[in-house]
Image (spheres, rainbow, N blue to C red):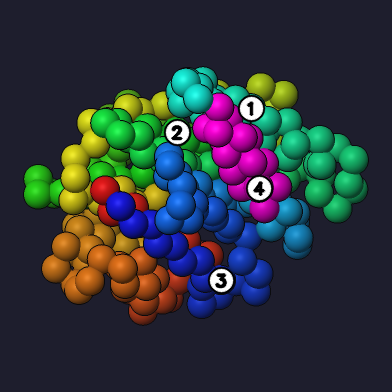
């Protein structure tokens, strides 16, 4: 069981508004979270940092209680992060209107649970290939589901960066939860759209399975995004089950 992460400002932006957290080797129930903030000059950075710190603290405290429901804790952690991001945007003039995406994964003895809000993604990678587990909460994903555009057209659509859900946007936030069977040796990838917008799923699969050691997988993905011009911040977290 291993966790690795990397976050980079990219090749164009002047500030990294992504944030991530992953548990250390001593964690009995490992987890990781990635947030991609949005807002003014500093607000996106504040939103993602507040959300990651709040989510990690709430989840860590809950997991320390024997018999706690991981499913309940995940929703609780998202709700608490949403409250804090929204509160900060209301009391700090510089942070008005800020928000952030969130994607997280918790590894239990037999299950892996993922939760998301927005368009930061969670993937499962194994012998059968790569599968996007989470669903983007975005305008273009809605268009794809309605059959109005294809997945390939979505990658270059002018509205590809418009999300339909975010922490801090509303008093109540709706998160989606996914439960997977834990399979030893497989990989769980969490990433911001700064990676998924410029690196295809199949390219991610190749880099993580055939590109070299797993512990350097996040760096290889970042390097590939940078080679494509990385117009946005890039964050990737890899969990080796």
The kind of secondary structure element at disc 4 is helix
The kind of secondary structure element at disc 3 is loop
The residue that label 4 is drawn on is 53
Q: Residue at x 16, y 62 (%)?
A: 209
Q: Does 109 appear above or below 229?
A: above
How far apart, in angstroms, are the residues tagged by discs 3 and 4? 19 Å
The residue that label 3 is drawn on is 9
> Between residues 192 and 156, which one lies in front from this camera angle?
192
> Where residue 144 appears, x then y in whole percent?
32, 34
How far apart, in angstroms, are the residues tagged by discs 2 and 3? 24 Å
Range of residues picked out in magenta: 49-65
> Where residue 74 appears, x then y in whole percent?
52, 29
Q: Residue at x 85, y 37 (%)?
A: 90
Which numbered disc, 2 or 3, marks the residue that appears first in the sequence? 3
Other-residue count near label 1 (Cα within 10 Å), few / some / many at <14 / 14–19 / ≥20: many
Residue 62 is one of the magenta-drawn residues: yes
For residue 79, which numbered disc appears in the image? 1
Label 1 or label 3, whichever lies nearer to me, is 1
Which numbered disc, 2 or 4, marks the residue that appears first in the sequence? 4
The kind of secondary structure element at disc 2 is strand
Which numbered disc, 2 or 1, marks the residue that appears first in the sequence? 1
Residue 116 is one of the magenta-drawn residues: no
């Amino acid at each position: 069981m291993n966790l690795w992460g990397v976050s980079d400002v990219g090749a164009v932006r002047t500030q990294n508004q992504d944030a991530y957290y992953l548990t250390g080797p001593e964690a009995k129930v490992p987890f990781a979270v990635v947030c991609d903030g949005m807002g003014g000059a500093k607000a996106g950075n504040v939103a993602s940092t507040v959300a990651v710190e709040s989510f990690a603290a709430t989840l860590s405290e809950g997991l320390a209680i024997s018999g706690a429901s991981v499913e309940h804790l995940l929703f609780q952690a998202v709700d608490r992060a949403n409250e804090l991001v929204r509160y900060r945007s209301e009391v700090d003039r510089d942070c008005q209107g800020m928000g952030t995406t969130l994607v997280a994964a918790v590894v239990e003895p037999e299950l892996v649970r993922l939760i998301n809000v927005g368009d930061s993604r969670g993937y499962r990678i194994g012998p059968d290939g790569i599968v996007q587990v989470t669903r983007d909460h975005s305008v273009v994903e809605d268009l794809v589901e309605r059959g109005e555009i294809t997945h390939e057209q979505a990658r270059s659509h002018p509205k590809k960066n418009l999300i339909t859900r975010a922490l801090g946007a509303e008093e109540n936030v709706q998160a989606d939860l996914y439960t997977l069977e834990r399979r030893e040796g497989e990989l769980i990838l969490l990433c911001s759209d700064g990676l998924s917008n410029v690196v295809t799923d199949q390219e991610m699969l190749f880099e993580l399975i055939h590109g070299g050691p797993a512990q350097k997988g996040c760096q290889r993905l970042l390097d590939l995004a940078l080679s494509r011009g990385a117009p946005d911040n890039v964050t990737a977290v890899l969990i080796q089950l």
